[in-house]
Image: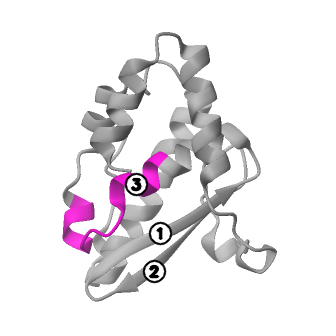
Amino acid sequence: MTIDELTENFSFLDSWEDRYKYLIELGNALNRLSEEEKIDQWKVPGCQSQVWIIPHYNNGTLHFTGDSDAIIVRGIIAIVLEIFKDKTAQEILDIDVEKIFDKMGLKEHITPNRRSGMLSMVDKIKYYAAQALGTEDGYSRVSS
């Protein structure tokens, strides 16, 4: 599923109760990480729930897998992973996620703690991209 398809699906849902149900569906569809993969190295700091995001490098692009112990957060992970799926490191650093989140209406309908966690996920992914470019020492948080 593409970001445009996700955005369109969100726009068809009238209530935020339906949108939360959709987030749960997305979370249920996300492949789970094994217990061996749920290590501190992949843990995302700044999330109220436990969240892990693992980068995979393949032919110049990055792909990510992720998981959480909270079902709605797993749905948010599914969206975040889709935004950055199969992009080059530079493309990842150039993506304006705030614009995408605004288009989906996510920012105003999730709790401040979940929003902060969502931005922490984005920061972790952008850090991995900077790392792939060898510029992680100069990387600073770009989301607020």
Report the residue marked by disc 3.
82
Report the residue marked by disc 2.
56
The part of the image, by quadrant, that contains residue 135 is bottom left
The part of the image, by quadrant, that contains residue 57 is bottom left
Q: Is residue 49 visible?
A: yes
Q: Residue placed at 41% from the left, 72% from the top? A: 63
Q: CA distance from mark 2 to mark 3?
A: 14 Å
Q: Nearer the viewer, mark 2 or mark 3?
A: 3
- Magenta stretch mostly in which secondary structure? helix
| Mark 2 neighbour class, 10 Å CA radius: few under 14, some 14 to 19, many 20 or more | few
Disc on res. 64: 1
Q: Is residue 89 magenta?
A: yes
Residue 7 x/y as whole percent: 34, 33
136 or 29, nearer to the observer? 29
Q: How is the image coloured?
A: one colour
State whether residue 46 is above or below residue 52. Answer: above
Q: Magenta stretch: give its range.
A: 79-93
Residue at the extreme top of the image, as rendered: 15
> CB atoms at circles 1 and 2 under 8 Å apart?
yes
Q: Disc 1 marks which amino acid?
A: Phe
Q: Is residue 111 visible?
A: no
Circle nearer the N terminus (1, 2): 2
Q: Disc 2 marks which amino acid?
A: His
